[in-house]
Image: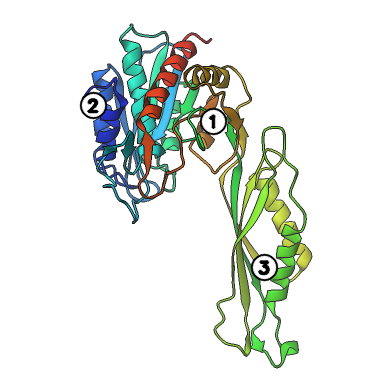
Amino acid sequence: MKLSDPIDLAQALIRCPSVTPEDAGALDLLAGALEGLGFACHHIRSATGGPEIRNLYARLGTEAPNVCFAGHTDVVPPGKGWTAEPFGGAVDQGRLFGRGAADMKGAIACFVAAVARLLESGKPKGSLSLLITGDEEGPAVDGTVKVLDWLAARGERIDCCIVGEPTNPRKLGDMMKIGRRGSLNCRLTVFGTQGHSAYPHLADNPIPRLLDILRRLTETPLDEGTPHFQASTLALTTVDVGNPATNVIPAEARAGFNIRFNDLHSGASLEAWIRDMVAQAGGEAEVAVEVSGESFLTPPGPLSEILAQAAFEVTGLRPELSTSGGTSDARFIKNHCPVVEFGLVGQTMHKSDEHVAIADMEALTEIYRRALVRLAETP
């Protein structure tokens, strides 16, 4: 396998059907490639959330700065509708096909190829490392966060990090993520007293109270956005009564909603606001809140500027600095060092016939190589 060519490694990784939580040999394959470049590889396993998850941390060098690339080899199930073999890694008409090509085995291969090319001209200053998890598409409780805990226990520091998520909406060079909105899910249950619909005064119907609460939650926008974030949003995801009878007032009614929030809020502040809205409606209710990630921002600085300049030199485009989209493992890394996300074009991620352009993989490899040269020289 020629490691300076990202296609070979990307094809080999795609041919490992590593649907979360299965590894299917992907991390051993990657570790073997990295050891061939001189990296010291450590396999970190964790099973606190269910099946055992495999993770990999690999480092070349011992000096600062430690420039890290973070990503994941686990993928979502292929689903139906493919014209190519989902785990075949086929190349056709200038495109590499397969589950994980965009999200994000392709970017991992590009980074490894960038390192291989960099080493051809001698070892760079500082250290290079990769933090690769098998638990990004799943619950994410046994993946990146466990490796970060392991690093902290060893006293090992990451100075900056590039996450290889497919950040570009249309063309390579379109967009870089310098933060992400937080995500909160709420399950709301309103209780009443069951009764006959012909005698509503003898029952306590929870449905009007639930509707009143939902009105209170949705009638006023949470905010108007901030300089780096769009406005926070609240989206109703389900309203359930589960009542098959037409002549029965139900005893309870339920709803679910998701809030994507910017840096004007925290999970705790939003939970307090939700509970206040529920209390204002009166009656008995139960609120269950889960925050999968807080909002965060890496302010524009040396890391984003170096990567953006490299992208401009290669593509002619200067990436928009964005915080749009869902969550990523950058939400864990931001507690340890500055982090940005930049990878391939994400138009086909999680879709059938997921693919990336071969030309984009070559360009991303060169972007990473140029960025690594400059980051290694940044104090």
Residue located farthest toward the front when viewing the structure as drawn:
93
Q: Earlier in the sequence, mark 2 or mark 3?
A: 2
Work out whether residue 133 can be spotted.
Answer: no
Q: Mark 2 or mark 1: which is in front?
A: 1
Image position, residue 164 (x, y; %)? 44, 31
User: How far is disc 1 from disc 3 in space, using C-alphas?
Assistant: 46 Å
Type of amino acid at the residue the image marks with label 2: Gly
Q: Mark 1 highlights which residue?
A: 174
Q: Residues within 10 Å of mark 2 (few under 14, many from 20)?
A: few
Number of the label disc, if any, that sits on residue 285: 3
Residue plotted at (62% across, 81% down): 250
User: How far is disc 2 from disc 1 in space, using C-alphas?
Assistant: 33 Å
Q: Mark 2 highlights which residue?
A: 32
Q: Earlier in the sequence, mark 1 or mark 3?
A: 1
Q: How is the image coloured?
A: rainbow
* 197 is higher (above) or lower (below) than 358: below
Find out whether the residues at labels 2 and 3 contact each other: C-beta distance under 8 Å: no
Q: Mark 1 or mark 3: which is in front?
A: 1
Image position, residue 180 (x, y; %)? 58, 37
Residue located farthest toward the left when viewing the structure as drawn:
1
* 54 is higher (above) or lower (below) than 314: below
User: How far is disc 2 from disc 3 in space, using C-alphas?
Assistant: 55 Å
Image position, residue 163 (x, y; %)? 46, 30
